[in-house]
Image (cartoon, rainbow, N blue to C red):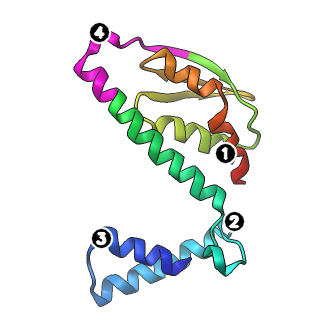
């Protein structure tokens, strides 16, 4: 897994110096040691759980789709219909709830405003965005993570 993260780091940064490589390796080893829950023992999967790959893929997809939706709303502001609503959730545990809230906030056009026991207050530029959250597809991804 460390090798995959190192390769990803090098692709994104484009720098290859001795100091940079040592700093990169040290930080990647620390990340691997601190966050052992992401890793499994099978070398075939590079130590990474497939549920995280599905989660990050859906996060990136949703970020791109909603970014274009927000861009369309900026160009044609007459279709903006700001709306806040409490959405019920079946997620338990503070870590899962914070992942869910951050996912919502990272997606353009939506924002988490408050979290209670089993519901979350979401502000969205359009009512349809909140309706999508009520389908609980995102919740099911998060429930499979941890």
Magenta stretch: dominant secondary structure: helix
Earlier residue among tags 2 and 3:
3
Residue 13 shows which numbered tag?
Answer: 3
Comparing 44 with 88, the one in front is 44
Q: Earlier in the sequence, mark 2 or mark 1?
A: 2
Distance from Cα at disc 1 to Cα at disc 4: 34 Å
Between the C-alphas of marks 2 and 3, the distance is 26 Å
The residue range painted magenta reads 70-84
SS category of the residue bearing label 3? helix
Total labels: the figure holds 4
Task: Provide the secondary structure element on which disc 4 rests.
Answer: helix
Q: Nearer the viewer, mark 4 or mark 2?
A: 4
Q: Residues within 10 Å of mark 3 (few under 14, many from 20)?
A: few
State the image coordinates of residue 51 (x, y, percent, origin top left). 65, 56
> Which numbered circle lies on residue 37?
2
Q: Earlier in the sequence, mark 1 or mark 4?
A: 4
Tag in front: 4 or 3: 4
Give the distance between the C-alpha atoms of the residues marked 4 and 3, in whole angstroms: 41 Å
The residue labelled by disc 1 is 142
Q: Residue at x 72, y 50 (%)?
A: 144
Q: Outermost residue toward the bottom?
A: 18
Structural crowding at the residue carrying mark 1, measured as other residues with C-alpha within 10 Å and reported as few (<14), some (14–19) or many (≥20): many
Q: Residues within 10 Å of mark 4 (few under 14, many from 20)?
A: few
Label 2 sits on a secondary structure element that is: helix
Residue linked to disc 4: 78
């Amino acid at each position: 897994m460390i090798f995959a993260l190192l390769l990803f780091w090098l692709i994104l940064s484009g720098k290859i110096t001795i100091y940079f490589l040592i700093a990169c390796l040290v930080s990647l080893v620390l990340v691997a040691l601190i966050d052992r829950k992401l890793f499994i023992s099978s070398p075939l999967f590079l130590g990474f759980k497939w549920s995280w790959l599905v989660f990050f893929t859906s996060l990136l997809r949703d970020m791109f789709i909603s970014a274009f939706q927000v861009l369309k709303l900026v160009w044609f502001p007459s279709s903006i219909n700001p709306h806040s609503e409490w959405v019920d959730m079946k997620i338990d545990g503070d870590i899962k709830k914070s992942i869910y809230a951050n996912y919502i906030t990272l997606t353009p056009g939506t924002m988490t405003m408050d979290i209670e026991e089993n519901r979350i207050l979401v502000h969205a530029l359009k009512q349809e965005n909140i309706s999508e959250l009520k389908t609980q597809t995102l919740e099911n991804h998060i429930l499979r993570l941890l």
